[in-house]
């Protein structure tokens, strides 16, 4: 019998966690420990803001990577029951090829797609793997170039002269339409780079791990989510695009994003289970 559950749909006012600077005016930092049992240390806090988040299912206009830095894909294959999404090696072997093909098909042009990482998140996981409820961008421009040099040390200078993008492919792995901790994302078309705060993540010995962008709130920002996301749908999230740095470019660079608690979520809703796969896309 078809399900009679009414899943939340439509625009919603919900809380998002934005960057709040250190009280003493110092530069923000985020220190990691090589001991996985130790929590990271940081000197900034979160500013909780009530935000109107629009349901893209009710939006008539199309959203594109070049204009908004995100795009909704429908009609993708459902999750094969043969893939163990708790097994990293199985994901690399059995799921990466599907993602690579999807990105190749959906991003126009003669592109080379390289998958370098993935993250599985579930509400019953440890702190590192629970849904991340802090508005952020995965890469600054410096960090994107650093990733290219990390994975392509011999070809980096050639690749960095062309167009290079980092695109995340985000999907729900839930058996029901996603209800708990959906993903919010902002359109790059209504986003100001002045709202990005670069924050370096370092180990205790000072070695650099990565540099991410945390986000200050602005009422000009336009926030969206995909209600009741199904396992045949994907969200493409652009984290960086070198073409956006060209003088006069109108190409979107990146989309801030965050998990959020939907106040309409039922008490017995299935906990979120999701995977995001990170791709470098090089264009000739």
Image (spheres, rainbow, N blue to C red):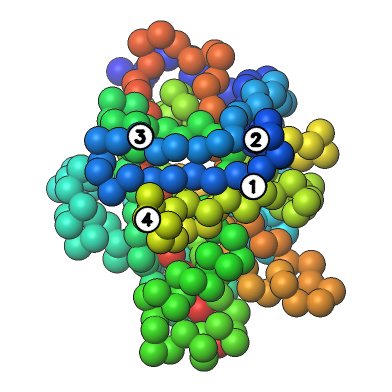
Disc 3 vs disc 1: which is toward the camera? 1
Q: Quadrant of residue 24?
A: top right
- x%, y% of residue 118? 34, 54
Which residue was labeled with disc 4?
205
Tell which of 24 and 267 is nearer to you. Answer: 24
Q: CA distance from mark 2 to mark 4?
A: 22 Å
Q: Residue at x 70, y 61 (%)?
A: 252
Which residue was labeled with disc 3?
39
N-terminal of the two: label 3 or label 4?
3
Q: Is residue 126 visible?
A: yes
Q: Residues within 10 Å of mark 1 (few under 14, many from 20)?
A: few
Q: CA distance from mark 2 to mark 3?
A: 19 Å
Q: Is residue 26 left or right of residue 273?
A: right
Query: Cβ–Cβ below 8 Å for labels 2 and 1?
Result: yes
Query: Cβ–Cβ below 8 Å for labels 2 and 3?
Result: no
Q: Is residue 185 left or right of residue 88?
A: right
N-terminal of the two: label 2 or label 1?
2
- x%, y% of residue 110? 52, 83
Disc 2 vs disc 4: which is toward the camera? 4
Q: CA distance from mark 3 to mark 1?
A: 20 Å
| Above-or-below relation of 148 to 206 | below
Q: Is residue 170 left or right of residue 8?
A: left
Q: Residues within 10 Å of mark 2 (few under 14, many from 20)?
A: some
Q: Residue furthest top?
A: 267
| Above-or-below relation of 256 to 20 | below
Which corner quadrant holds the C terminus?
A: bottom right
Which residue was labeled with disc 1?
27
Which residue was labeled with disc 2?
22
N-terminal of the two: label 1 or label 4?
1
N-terminal of the two: label 2 or label 3?
2
N-terminal of the two: label 2 or label 4?
2
């Amino acid at each position: 019998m078809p399900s009679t559950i009414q899943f939340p749909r439509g625009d919603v006012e919900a809380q998002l966690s934005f960057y709040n600077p250190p009280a003493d005016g110092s530069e923000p930092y985020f220190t990691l420990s090589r001991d996985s049992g130790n929590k990271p240390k940081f000197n900034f806090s979160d500013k909780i803001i009530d935000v109107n988040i629009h349901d893209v299912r009710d939006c008539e206009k199309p959203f594109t990577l070049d204009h908004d830095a995100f795009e909704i894909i429908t009609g993708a294959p459902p999750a094969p029951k043969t893939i163990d999404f708790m097994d990293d090696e199985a994901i690399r072997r059995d799921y990466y090829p599907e993602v690579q093909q999807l990105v190749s098909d959906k991003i126009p042009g003669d592109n080379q797609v390289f998958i370098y990482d993935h993250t599985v998140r579930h509400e019953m996981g440890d702190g590192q793997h629970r849904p991340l409820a802090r508005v952020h961008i995965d890469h600054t421009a410096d960090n994107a170039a650093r990733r290219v040099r990390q994975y392509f040390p011999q070809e980096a200078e050639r690749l960095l002269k062309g167009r290079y993008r980092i695109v995340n492919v985000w999907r729900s792995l839930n058996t029901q339409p996603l209800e708990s901790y959906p993903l919010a994302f902002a359109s790059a078309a209504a986003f100001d780079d002045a709202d990005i705060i670069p924050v370096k993540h370092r180990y205790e010995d000072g070695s650099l791990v990565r540099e991410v962008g945390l986000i200050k709130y602005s009422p000009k920002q336009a926030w969206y989510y995909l209600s009741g996301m199904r396992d045949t749908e994907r969200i493409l999230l652009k984290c960086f695009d070198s073409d956006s740095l060209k003088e006069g470019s109108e190409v979107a660079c990146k989309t801030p994003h965050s998990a959020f608690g939907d106040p309409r979520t039922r008490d017995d809703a299935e906990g979120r289970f999701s995977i995001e796969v990170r791709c470098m896309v090089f264009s000739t």
